[in-house]
Image (cartoon, grey):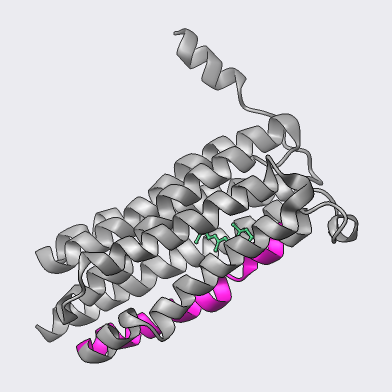
């Protein structure tokens, strides 16, 4: 009962000109809809592809739950929910690395590749978090370290061992791998831009408070849902062929 009352009391007011709040709200709905779509499609796939599509659904579902908290936090305090944001990322980005590994398994991907990419993403996110919270006045240096780790991920999939495995796999796997590579290079590049928007003294005055969240929210929608759809599409194509 008390729990229920807490939930009903926690619905915060949305101001009509709160565009940032709007993107949190729409983000939450979009992630929920995408999760329903991926989960409900699971039955049509055989075992080999089911795991990949399941992970797509988990990524958007984890995001949906975090967006629920983030939109409340924003509504209540009109402040960036940086903590929830990074908890979401630290769970979902490694799952995106897992997607790369899962589709490349047909070409003999080893778990070493998976751990390497997870390691890079943890470095990228922990240093980004430190730059946005604990060491705000050294945002540049933490952002730089984070950027190097981001570059390492991009290198691995575009030119490193993951790229070689994709070439060896060929066909729809290679096609899907290429599209995912573009997501990482272009879609993920929105995040460092958002980070710069949020760093004091850089562009904060240009677009105002909340612009960092708008950038992150748009990037999340593109990357999490788009990424999932590429995997879904690959699963559909491969299934027809078999
Ligand atoms: C679903 C969430 C995703 C795909 C999040 C990705 C986040 C990044 C690629 C963040 C990158 C950052 C930098 C490259 C430098 C500045 C700090 C970060 C963490 C915003």
Which of the two residues, 161 or 100, is positioned nearer the viewer here? 161
Indicate left or right for 200 with 110 as reference: right
Identity of the residue drawn at 68% across and 37% down: 74
Of residues 108 and 204, which is closer to you in this image? Answer: 108
Residue 134 screen position, x and y as percent: 68, 40
The quadrant in which the N terminus is found is: top left
102 in relation to 107, above or below: above
Q: Would you say residue 173 sits in the magenta stretch?
A: yes
Q: Residue at x 35, y 57 (%)?
A: 95
Q: Is residue 154 at least partly visible in the picture? A: yes
- Relative to 133, is 44 on the left or the right? left
| Magenta stretch: includes residue 181 | yes
Q: Is residue 43 left or right of residue 29?
A: left
Up-down: is 58 above or below 241? above
Is residue 34 found left or right of 71 in the rendered image?
left
Part of the protein shown in magenta: 169-195
Residue at image location 75% in from the left, 46% down from the top: 136
Q: Which residue shows up at 54% across the image and 16% down it?
A: 6
């Amino acid at each position: 009962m008390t729990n229920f009352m807490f939930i009903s009391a926690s619905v915060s007011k949305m101001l009509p000109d709160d565009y940032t709040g709007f993107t949190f709200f729409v983000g939450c709905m979009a992630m929920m809809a995408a999760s329903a779509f991926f989960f409900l499609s699971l039955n049509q796939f055989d075992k080999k592809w089911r795991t990949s599509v399941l992970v797509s659904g988990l990524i958007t579902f984890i995001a949906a739950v975090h967006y629920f908290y983030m939109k409340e936090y924003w509504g209540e305090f009109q402040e960036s929910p940086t903590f929830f944001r990074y908890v979401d990322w630290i769970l979902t980005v490694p799952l995106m690395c897992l997607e790369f590994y899962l589709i490349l398994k047909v070409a003999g991907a080893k778990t070493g590749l998976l751990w390497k990419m997870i390691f890079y993403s943890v470095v990228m996110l922990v240093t980004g978090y430190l730059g946005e919270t604990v060491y705000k006045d050294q945002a540049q240096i933490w952002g730089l370290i984070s950027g190097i780790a981001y570059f390492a991920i991009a290198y691995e999939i575009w030119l490193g061992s993951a790229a070689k495995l994709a070439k060896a796999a060929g066909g729809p796997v290679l096609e899907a791998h290429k599209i995912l590579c573009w997501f990482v290079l272009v879609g993920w590049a929105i995040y460092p831009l958002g980070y710069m928007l949020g760093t004091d003294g850089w562009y904060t005055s240009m677009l105002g408070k909340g612009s960092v969240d708008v950038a992150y929210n748009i990037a999340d929608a593109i990357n999490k849902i788009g990424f999932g759809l590429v995997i879904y599409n690959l699963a559909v194509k491969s299934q027809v062929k078999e």
